[in-house]
Image (cartoon, grey):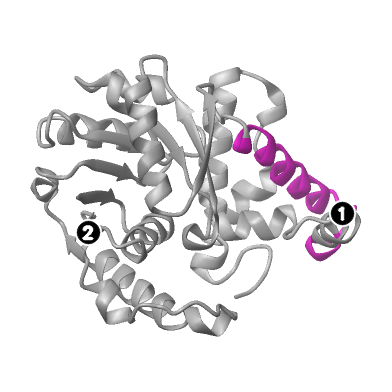
Amino acid sequence: MQIGVIGAGVMGSGVAQALAQSGLSVVVVDIDQAKLEQARGEIANALRFRALFGSSEKLEAADAVMERIQFTTEHQQLSDVSFVIENATESWEVKRDIYELIDGICREDCIFMINTSCISITKLAAVTGRPAQVIGTHFMNPVPAKKTVEVIRGFHTSDACVSAVGELMGEMGKEMIVVNDYPGFVSNRISHLFMNEAAFVVQDGVASAEEVDDIFKKCYGHAMGPLETADLIGLDTVVHSLKVLYDSYQDPKFRCCPLLQKMVDAGLHGRKSGQGFYSY
């Protein structure tokens, strides 16, 4: 079985690595050749350094895992995949254009798995000729290390589609929690309120980023604070998602913090740019 992965950014690279580590054949598609080469290097490095994290299991050689991943700029290479996991920019227009394109390329029985933070699964499914085979799969970052996936059932998503995705998750060693389709679903509808309000707290001078995150880690027992999480996700992605949530619900609680927007405008996108609320 071969799996298509669209998007060679942080999430797409993580998904491709997790699939290949599970013994699955992967085709990674991105329109940017430089991004594909970057993804190739990052996945190879991640595989080589896995042993440093204390795992006692016998790990397959990095080169053997890499042989299962093909990198290409050609969407036509998705013509025979069983699943497509799409991880493109959190933009309705970008994602819509992708699904309109691949709907005419992929096999009729291919399932489309949308890895999105907030965009409606039902709305994207409607631009395809296979809405029953479209489902949301919100992987958490870093994908290879996270054992649970938020799976979103669209209005037309079939039971057979949910079952097939469950089998794929099982092959990847992951559990899925199935929820219904409203923008932001469960995880991001709640977590983006945390990240946005944390940015307001810093903007208003109530506390520093470190102090905000320490309260969440030391008082609430969270593994990461909301601003560390925002840096990991990418501040640009957080801003995009907040705009989707605001447009979807027309609720002022999702109004993007001006400091977040200012940082994104300045190119401070978090870990991937080397600077966000923290330096990397």
Compared to residue 204, the image places residue 39 above or below, namely below
| Mark 2, other Cα within 10 Å: few <14 / some 14–19 / many ≥20 | many
Closer to the N terminus: mark 2 or mark 1?
2
| Figure disc tally | 2
In the foreground, 250 or 157: 157
**Amino acid type indicated by mark 1:** Gly
Residue farthest toward the top in the current orientation of the protein = 155
Q: Which residues are magenta?
A: 187-211
In the picture, the quarter occupied by the C terminus is bottom right
- Residue 160: image location, x then y, percent: 32, 24
Taking 227 as reference, is 49 left or right?
left
Q: Is residue 122 above or below residue 108?
A: above
- The quarter of the picture where residue 196 lies is top right
Picture coordinates of residue 85, whole percent (x, y): 32, 44
- Tell me where residue 276 sits by quadrant: bottom right
Q: Which residue is mark 2?
A: 25
Q: Residue 122 placed where, x, y %? A: 39, 20
Q: Give the labeled residue for mark 1.
A: 205
Looking at the image, residue 257 sits to the left or right of residue 125; the answer is: right
Q: Main secondary structure of the magenta part?
A: helix
**Residue at the spot x=32%, y=71% of the render?**
38
Which residue shows up at 43% across the image and 39% down it? 137
Q: Which class describes the residues within 10 Å of circle 1: few (<14), some (14-19), or many (20+)?
A: few
Q: Nearer the viewer, residue 183 or 207?
A: 183
Residue placed most toward the observer, 246 or 28? 28
Disc 2 versus disc 1: nearer the observer: 2
Q: Secondary structure at mark 2?
A: strand
Residue 218 percent coordinates (x, y) = 88, 61
Q: Secondary structure at mark 1?
A: loop
Residue type marked 2 = Ser
Answer with left or right where residue 132 lies relative to residue 262.
left
Distance (Cα) linking label 2 and label 1: 50 Å
